[in-house]
Image (cartoon, grey):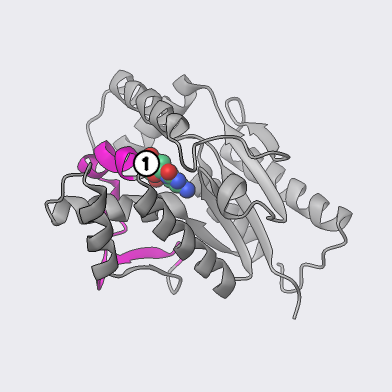
Amino acid sequence: MSSPIIITIDGPAGTGKSSAALMLADRLGFDMLDTGAMYRAVALLAIESKIDPHDEARLAIAMDRTTLDVDFSSRPPVIRLGERDVHHRIRDADVTGIVSLIASHHEVRDRLVRAQRQVALQHDRLVTEGRDQGSVVFPDATVRVWLDARPQVRASRRTEELRARGEQVDEERVLAEIIERDSSDRGRAEGPLQCPTGAAEIDTSDMTFESVVTELERLVRARLNESNIRCGGCA
Ligand code: DC
């Protein structure tokens, strides 16, 4: 059996990480893990269980009493909270509004980091995206990437995405929320949003989606070649 290959993609909100990670995974024939969706599912658990999002101890108990699974039988994989597919529900504004606070809790991060490492044991060709994948969860990943873009560009992309879903949004408000969420994600003590040491940095501000994916694929294939890593089942 060939060694596992893990590619991490980290960066702030609105850099297009999830879509780029999924497309990259498709091109390589890898699985893709959206770790932000896991934090969002815990935020939804807090909302539905009427737990104060500051109450870390109660959140931990609720997490231990429920199952949070990533179902890889769909592509992209869907998140299941208990038996329910919450893939769409976790993108709603009430979840987005508290997820950064939820993600700042040690008890939450500890459980999700363990769950993410467990996923990697079962999926040995994995593109995983989030905020701490290359810095904390998989510091020995085969390839680590940091995606960034100017805040205004990120806000405009996120606004388009939300409008495409039929939501009425104000771009200035989206920008303010992005800035606030980044600052909270950067400032937390555990697993803060930061560029992992040694990561390849890509500023996507002036790039098309297609060119971001092409650059990611080029980078990954070059690293694998340099390190003489055989991709095995890679497409
Ligand atoms: O990528 P996203 O917007 O779906 O992420 C939701 C929140 O989860 C965001 O505030 C950052 C947090 N997050 C995190 O702290 N660590 C991760 N690995 C992924 C997301």
Q: What residue lies at 82% left-to-right and 50% top-to-bottom?
A: 222
Quarter of the figure that contains the N terminus? bottom right
Q: Nearer the viewer, residue 85 or 54?
A: 54
**Relative height, residue 173 to residue 62 (above, below):** above
Magenta residues? 75-102
Left or right placement of residue 129 versus residue 30 in this view = left
Please state if 152 lies on the left or on the right of 163 as rendered. Answer: right
Q: Residue furthest left?
A: 50
- Residue position for label 1: 104
In the image shown, does 11 or 175 lie closer to the viewer? 11
Q: Nearer the viewer, residue 171 or 40?
A: 40
Q: Residue furthest front?
A: 57
Q: Amino acid at mark 1?
A: Ser
Relative to 5, 176 lies left or right: left
User: Of helix, strand and loop, which one carries label 1?
Assistant: loop
Q: Is 223 colored magenta in this rendering?
A: no
Give how far across and how far down residue 148 sits, in percent: 57, 31
Confirm if mark 1 falls within 8 A of ligand 1: yes
Q: Position of residue 166 (x, y in %)?
A: 25, 40
Q: Quadrant of residue 25?
A: bottom right
Considering the image in quadrants, where does the C terminus appear? bottom right
- Residue drawn at the location 61% of the way across and 48% of the way down: 134
Residue 165 appears in the figure: no
Whole-percent x and y of residue 83?
25, 73
